[in-house]
Image (cartoon, grey):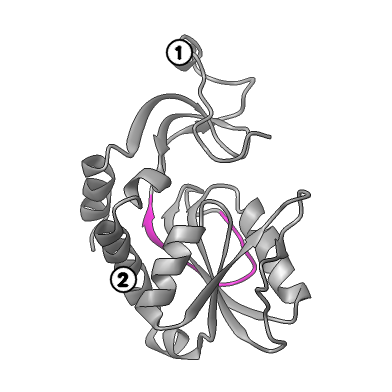
Amino acid sequence: MTDDEVLAEFRAAGALLEGHFILSSGRRSGNYLQCARVLMNAERAGRLARAMVQQLPRELRQDIDLVVSPAMGGVIIGHEAGRALDRDAIFLERPEGTFELRRGFAVTPGQKVLMVEDVVTTGLSSRQAIEAVEAAGGIVLAEAALVDRSAGEVDLGVPFYPLVSINFPVYDADDIPPELAAIPAEKPGSRKQ
């Protein structure tokens, strides 16, 4: 799937938004990719997950024992990646601000894990999720994501395979351009902190 085809999926779902957005990182952008909206259609979610998984090296795909994703954003795409790989998929939650396995989910020590996210911007959530899996004894082989918004600068400590890299301009809250400052800011993501 080409970058244009991936973006066409977002456009078709009304998931490529324009305005003034506060990202989970606290930074600001004039564009927002609403992955929950692009993934609300099961067929589309499956297509995107299969494309994301197919770009992984064959040896890596064969070594994966388990797919893990951070809630909320990674749950649907993680589940669909598990389906594409024919592996179980579980998710981490942060009921108290720190990622943990709940709902009877567990990682067996030595189990080889693919971490799956929807969007990576700074990589903080991904690194925290990877640390939680490693603390449980898992070995995170790599991370796959629908979208890399880091301009290729993110370092997760493991190989990173985004389906598409999108470099929309991102600004610090105290350094936004006047045309963006003139638009009321929205926080469309799942994290309100």
Amino acid type shown at disc 2: Arg
Could you tell which of marks 2 and 1 lies nearer the N-terminus? 2
153 left or right of 98 in image: left
Residue numbers of the magenta segment: 154-165
**Vertically, is 105 above or below 149?**
below
Residue at figure coordinates x 51%, y 85% from the top left: 64
How far apart, in angstroms, are the residues tagged by discs 2 and 1?
37 Å
The residue lying at 29 percent from left, 53 percent from top is 41
Quadrant in the picture for residue 52: bottom left
Whether the magenta-drawn stretch holds residue 161 is answered as yes
Asked if the stretch drawn in magenta spans residue 22, the answer is: no
Asked whether 182 or 104 is in front, the reply is 104
Occupied quadrant, residue 191: top right
Seen from the viewer's position, the closer of residues 38 and 19 is 38
Q: Position of residue 93 (x, y in %)?
A: 66, 57
Residue drawn at x 54%, y 86% is 65
- Dot 2 crowding, Cα within 10 Å, few <14, some 14–19, many 20+: some
| Foreground: disc 2 or disc 1 | 2
Residue 183 disc label:
1
Tag 2 residue = 50
